Image: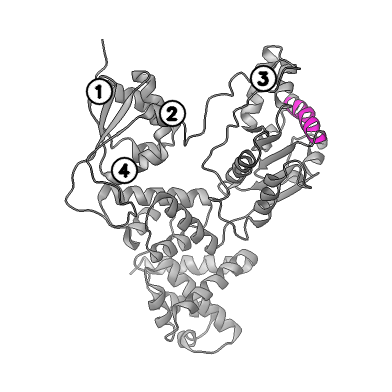
Amino acid sequence: MDKDHIQVWQSCLQTIKENVKEQSFKTWFEPIRPLRLDEKILTIQVPNKFFYEWLEEHYIGILGSTLSKELGQGAKLEYLIPRQQKHTNYLKSNKSNNPIVSKDLERNYGQNTIRTENIKNPFVIPGIQKIKIDSQLNPEYTFDMYVEGDCNRLARSAGWAIAKRPGQTAFNPLMIFGSVGLGKTHLAHAIGNEVLDKFDDKTVLYVSSDRFTNQFIEALRNNAISDFVNFYQLVDVLIIDDIQFLENKQKTQEIFFHIFNHLHQKGKQLILTSDRPPKEMEGIEERLISRFKWGLSADLQLPSLETRMAIIDQKMIQDGVDLPPNVTEFISHNVRTNVRELEGILVSLIAQAALNQREIDIDLAREVISKFVDNISSEVNIELIQKIVAEYYDIPVEKLKEKTRKKMIVRARQLSMYLAKLMSDKSLKLIGKAFGGRDHSTVIHACRSVEDLLEKNTNFKDEVYRIEKKIKNVGGQH
């Protein structure tokens, strides 16, 4: 019996759910309603025009592949967008408001998505002509979309040099290391994409260490180790992600050692990512560790306030969303962990605005951020912050508003401004006014000074933590 529109869409959802993050699935796919099926055309209803544009921008590949799987070649998806009485004004898009939009997903499938299936037929017979290898790169990870800052300047500069002369620089191998969510994978893909763009004759391959290990085990089971090695020796630029997961896998390390040596001796480029520097890796053979150190080890650190603001601006430009400057500042001050969490909050913010037909403002940003970080209190005001900071440093509150340049008072005043921006919803202008009528540029300078000191001085970081905790405790009692 032929499936109806509901059954077809439910089958599609089962596949989609396995291939996207849980939060993304709930946000972008659960609200969709299947309406009808006309031969190979499935019509679905989405909440609004922005919702449709987001799906087309970010999920066209998986929508196309799942629908083609269910309905066969030539399958199409048709969107129904209900007409609505009120509209938000934060979208930059000026596209038509036509409520019916059709897309030929077969034509668009795969243009903006990374292939997730295993590398097809990764083994070749030694001696035959070089074959075309799918790079497995994500085309959206480029240098243009990678925001440079003090936190990543060395790694990015080295990556750019490699992209212009792969295998011919002193950065071979390039080891990119850092904590989760700081952009290691993005930078590695950006290098590979730039090489592909500049050199038609170069073969680039991105592979996670887990996939490399699984392929090796499969080759071992099929008695095809020679073919496995020969395949990887065809590559001009080899990118191995999360190399630390080779720890304690002696056989896999041994085969990688031989592949590494061959590629390096032939002037091929190796790029590795890890969550720690080579010297801190345990369970990796010393001969491999020594080779990891041959080139450059570049670390990625937590982005500064300015870099976080630039990342937000870049992301919003990419998604066609006009984010108010005060919201950008508010998010940047409150989300300080890593880029991945920052991007996740932006996606949630956009989704909430689109689904609930709300303007993106401080109130909405506060609601979204409160689900991720626990450092916001709507009861906190500037007077409370000034009082607690002054008490901590044992100075009169009035001194924070004077023009004195005594070091301790300057630090207390700058910290008070920083915390006012972080913990209240007051504008820069109002914060400056509360500190003796200073202008917004003084507040910006104060915030930057505190951010710099937080990154360099552990004792100061502890002080700020204690002050923040007290402000929250006292503020919560009002």
Q: CA distance from mark 2 to mark 1?
A: 21 Å
- Residue at 79 percent across and 28 percent down: it is 258
Of circles 2 and 1, the one toward us is 1
Which disc, if any, is residue 217? 3
Sequence-first disc among 2 and 1: 1
Residue 209 in the image, given as x and y percentages of width and height? 65, 32
Could you tell whether 34 is left or right of 373 in the image? left
Q: Quadrant of residue 42?
A: top left
Residue that mark 1 sits on: 5
Residue 106 in the image, given as x and y percentages of width and height? 39, 26
Q: Mark 1, residues whose alpha carbon is within 10 Å: few (<14), some, or many (≥20)? A: many
Sequence-first disc among 1 and 4: 1
Stretch of the chain drawn in magenta: 252-265
The amino acid beneath tag 1 is His
User: Foreground residue, 128 or 259?
Assistant: 128
Where 340 sits versus 459, above or below? above
The amino acid beneath tag 3 is Ile
Q: CA distance from mark 3 to mark 4?
A: 43 Å
Could you tell whether 329 is left or right of 211 in the image? left
Q: Secondary structure at mark 1?
A: helix
User: Foreground residue, 74 or 112?
Assistant: 74
Of circles 3 and 1, the one toward us is 1
Sequence-first disc among 2 and 4: 2
Q: Quadrant of residue 206?
A: top right
Asked if the residue under mark 4 is in contact with the one under mark 2, i.e. CB atoms within 8 Å, the reply is no
Q: CA distance from mark 1 to mark 4?
A: 20 Å
Where 218 sits versus 34, above or below? above
Q: Is residue 267 visible?
A: yes
Residue that mark 2 sits on: 18
Of circles 2 and 4, the one toward us is 4
Which disc, if any, is residue 51? 4
